[in-house]
Image (spheres, rainbow, N blue to C red):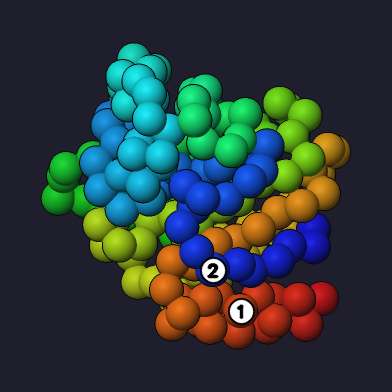
Amino acid sequence: MEFTVTQGDIAAQRADALVNAAGTSLQMGSGVAGALRRGANGPINDEAVSKGPIELGEVAVTDAYELDAEYVIHAVAMPHYGDRQATAESIREATRNSLTKADNLRCESLVIPILGTGAAGYEFEDGAQLVCEAVWDYQPTSLSDVRVIAYSQQEYETIERIAEDVRKSV
């Protein structure tokens, strides 16, 4: 499916659903999870934790509270506080399951970060390749606006380059 790349704070985005890069416990710590937790300004962490733990690649949904969205989809691409890191398969599955869940919720718009990188330990460029490919290959039923988000300018440039390559590979 077509998608765009954007730069900024995911907690400041407007969409039907925002995707959180979660660990299996669904505890919302730092990074994307911390930004969403702070932006939600409500018991999002307690609600998320009450739905866990869940397996790698799976997703859980919470209310978005004060974020400019209806839902937060917590996508698990990494174990929580363990020796193991995210894997290519956990990133692909978490991305696909996020898209499917958004479709099942009849969302039209979704913002997703590069899952499995940062604290999860997967190399950013490789993770971006996996997320962009999974989004591009997805066949939506209700989704029409999917944005892959980067926090920094450097991340944005990397994702945009990878997204262009993925789009040309058809």
Q: Looking at this view, is 86 or 31 the one in front? A: 31
* SS category of the residue bearing label 2: strand
Q: Residues within 10 Å of mark 1 (few under 14, many from 20)?
A: many
- x, y percent for residue 114: 47, 60
Q: Looking at this view, is 41 or 146 the one in front? A: 41
Query: Is mark 2 in CB contact (under 8 Å) with mark 1?
Result: no
Q: Residues within 10 Å of mark 2 (few under 14, many from 20)?
A: some
Q: Residue at x 68, y 83 (%)?
A: 165
Residue 141 badge: none
In the figure, 78 relative to 28: above or below?
Answer: below
Q: CA distance from mark 2 to mark 1?
A: 10 Å
In the figure, 159 relative to 40: above or below?
Answer: below
What count of labels does the image hold? 2
Q: Looking at this view, is 121 or 67 the one in front? A: 67
Q: Earlier in the sequence, mark 2 or mark 1?
A: 2
Q: Report which quarter residue 127 is drawn in.
A: bottom left
Q: Amino acid at mark 1?
A: Glu
The quarter of the image holding the C terminus is: bottom right
Residue 7 badge: 2
Q: Residue at x 49, y 25 (%)?
A: 65
- Circle 1 residue: 160
- x, y percent for residue 6: 60, 67
Q: Amino acid at mark 2?
A: Gln
Q: Is residue 24 visible?
A: no
Q: Is residue 19 visible?
A: yes
In the figure, 12 relative to 150: above or below?
Answer: above
